[in-house]
Image (spheres, rainbow, N blue to C red):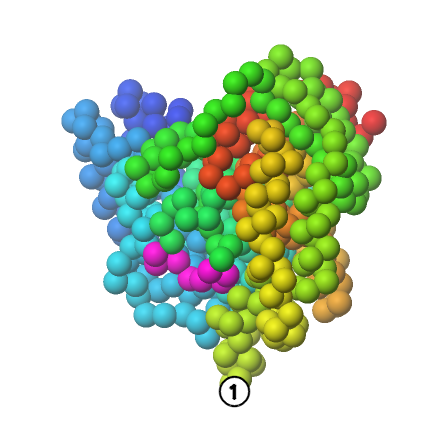
Amino acid sequence: MPGPHRRAAVVMIAELISRFGRLEDTPTGVVEDRLRRVADDEHVFTSLMPGAAREQAAASTERWRDGRPAGRLDGLPVAVKDCIDVAGTPTTNGSLVDAEASATRDAGIVRALRASGAIVIGKANLSELAFSGIGTNPHFGSPVNPLSRDEPLITGGSSSGSAAAVASGQVPLAVGTDTSGSVRVPAALCGVVGYKASEGRFPRDGVRTLSPTLDSIGVLVPTAADLVVVTAALDPCVGSPGPRAPGPVRLVVPEDEVVADVAPEVAAWFRGAVEELSVLDDVRVERRPLPVLAAAQELMDRHGTLVAAEAFCGYGRLLDGTSAGLLDSAVVRRLRLASRVVSTVGPVRAHMTTLRERVAAELDGGLLLCPTVRDAPPAVSLVTASADVFDRWNARILRTTMLLSYLGMPGVSVPRGDGRRRGLGLLVSAPDGHDRAVIRAAQLIDDAPTNPHHVNR
């Protein structure tokens, strides 16, 4: 197995920033440490920028010594998914055919990070064109899940390097994108927290497009408390949050395939986690049908997905000429299949607004709670055994999160209890625009005590 795929001790972001403020640690020391960790691993980053990172760390160290930090994340090392522009570096999008010359301007989300004082140390690896939930990449190498033991496990995708970088302790914060689950899925499989924002909540300029309708920015961090710190720091870039409902947080566990169609070990873990949450004073768990989930899934099963149709519109040109020979074979297969749904996906698009209104009505102020992914992370060797096996795993891994993306739901995947070391995540989601509600619920879920007797019973 290439590289040391062990989980490193991770310092929470608030504690790290607090150390800077007390002058017990410096951005210079932290950045040097993270650059050493990155050098010891393979395939997590597509490129590094050590010179610029060291220069920015030195400036940040001086600001902290002078008591004038630039923002709430001053000195924090960050990884940025390599479909997002960082000035002075190429944006490869995980591909040999879609790479561009060095970006001349930071993407909007990178500008927001820099305004808060964060330091970009490198570009994180990803599935080619951000078009896979598995996380492998034949061009830049495939990041291996830091939870791996005897054999390499998949990270999930497409924000594979971003999740691996956080889970291995190489950075405390990584920025990704999420269209069908590309932040939530690898966050769950690697045992970290992953947040998919509402579409348009963060600026998307300077980000390679997969699906203009569904693309969203997301972040990956070790804990939900870290997510609160990061989103507070980026607050000038976000819209107004939805109103906070009075009383306890209502978590709706749907009587639907997103809960029923999961592996036995996931079902047992999820059942125990829900029972633990149900005894909390500030939580009310409701188990009831949400017919909108089945209606939306049936539409996509019958007509295809918006993601596939829009991905073909953006990247179908790569199937012509010599470009196809340079693409990941899995991407070629998905694009060819996507070409068949471009003309059939009309009903999916036509009903989207109505179904999004329905999910808000059926939740009635509650938050959806379900497993992020329906299986624990499989071995790379299993998933890549054949093209058919790869494609079946890819579809299953993304099935829940793709559905919720179509319904416009921001969400946070939280590893709970032994799910953190087993690659299992609880996904809390809300109607479009209610990001603050899911972030608050994620912190409540992450902070709640666990009962070891609920494991696999």
Q: Position of residue 329 (x, y in %)?
A: 62, 73
Q: Is residue 301 visible?
A: yes
Q: Position of residue 145 (x, y in %)?
A: 61, 48
Q: Residue at x 52, y 87 (%)?
A: 321
Question: How many marks do you count on the picture?
Answer: 1
Q: Residue at x 77, y 23 (%)?
A: 454
Q: Nearer the viewer, residue 153 or 269?
A: 269
Q: Could you tell me which quadrant the C terminus lies in?
A: top right
Q: Residue at x 67, y 47 (%)?
A: 400
Q: Position of residue 185 (x, y in %)?
A: 60, 47
Q: Residue at x 70, y 39 (%)?
A: 290
Look at the picture and state if 110 lies above or below 271: below
Q: Is residue 35 visible?
A: no
Identify the magenta region: 205-212
Residue receiving disc 1: 321
Amino acid at dot 1: Gly
Name the image quarter holding residue 445. Answer: top right
